[in-house]
Image (tube, rainbow, N blue to C red):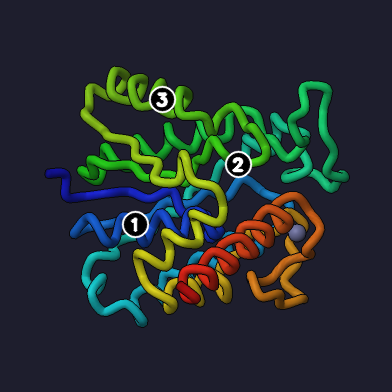
Amino acid sequence: MHSKALVLFSGGQDSTTCLAFALERYPHVETIGFDYRQRHRVELERRESIRAALHRDFPRWHGRLGEDHLVRIDALADVSTTALTRDIEIVMDEKGLPNTFVPGRNLLFLTFAGAVAYRRGLKVIVGGMCETDFSGYPDCRDDTIKAMQLALNLGMDARFVVETPLMWLDKAATWRLAEELGGSALVDLVVEETHTCYLGERGARHDWGYGCGTCPACKLRAEGWRKYSIDKRSLQSK
Ligand code: ZN
């Protein structure tokens, strides 16, 4: 049984759910986040308050949440021209990929995560990559992650296991997983504290949380919430 995990933790809905997943399963969990000069830093700024809330409000995970590692990868912004790193509009490219795609981002994240996990003696690397996501980001696909696990294990002579608990879930199922893991307290935490909006807006509070409500990330989160809420009501009425 693996006992120590490192969670790729950005401060968004998905990675917060992954962090709860890891806390439920592993007695020692560390987090890693990346500062790549992303346009909106609000997601990164959420990380500390989410970690604090998990520590404060979930006694059974007490003592499990270990160190946080924030890694600066300035070079990623130097080599990319996407809507997440530059002040440009979100549009689709000729391949049907949104220009929020930062080529190589998850490959780099996993490589750095592997380096930290190696140094810290952590066997499991947990990431929120999801193939059912609207965007079709190729570096979120299951095959990519499996290839990265192999590459890390060969390149570092290690036996890492890369876990992606959200890989086959849609956003409604991700909300449901949060509820299964931490009840309504965790769902509330995800609503109140996490940030997903591509435009970095935290002004308006919707029933699914904060955000502009119109960018692709907000739409996906809102649609998932709507479906999750409907399913929940129909279960309760049975
Ligand atoms: Zn938004």
- How packed mark 2 is, by other alpha carbons closer than 10 Å (few <14, some 14-19, many 20 or more), is some
Q: Quadrant of residue 99?
A: top right
Residue at the spot x=42%, y=78% of the render? 185
Residue at the spot x=54%, y=73% of the render? 233
* Residue corresponding to mark 1: 21
- Of the numbered discs 3 and 1, the one sitting upstream in the chain is 1
Three-letter amino acid code of the residue under disc 1: Phe
**In the figure, 210 relative to 176: above or below?**
below
Q: Name the one closer to the observer, 42 or 99.
A: 99
- Of the numbered discs 3 and 2, the one sitting upstream in the chain is 2
* Residue corresponding to mark 2: 133
Quadrant containing the C terminus is: bottom left
Tags 1 and 2 touching, CB below 8 Å = no
Tags 3 and 2 touching, CB below 8 Å = no
* Residue corresponding to mark 3: 148
Residue at the spot x=42%, y=59% of the render? 177
Q: Name the one closer to the observer, 225 or 162.
A: 225
Q: Is residue 90 left or right of residue 31?
A: right
- How packed mark 1 is, by other alpha carbons closer than 10 Å (few <14, some 14-19, many 20 or more), is many
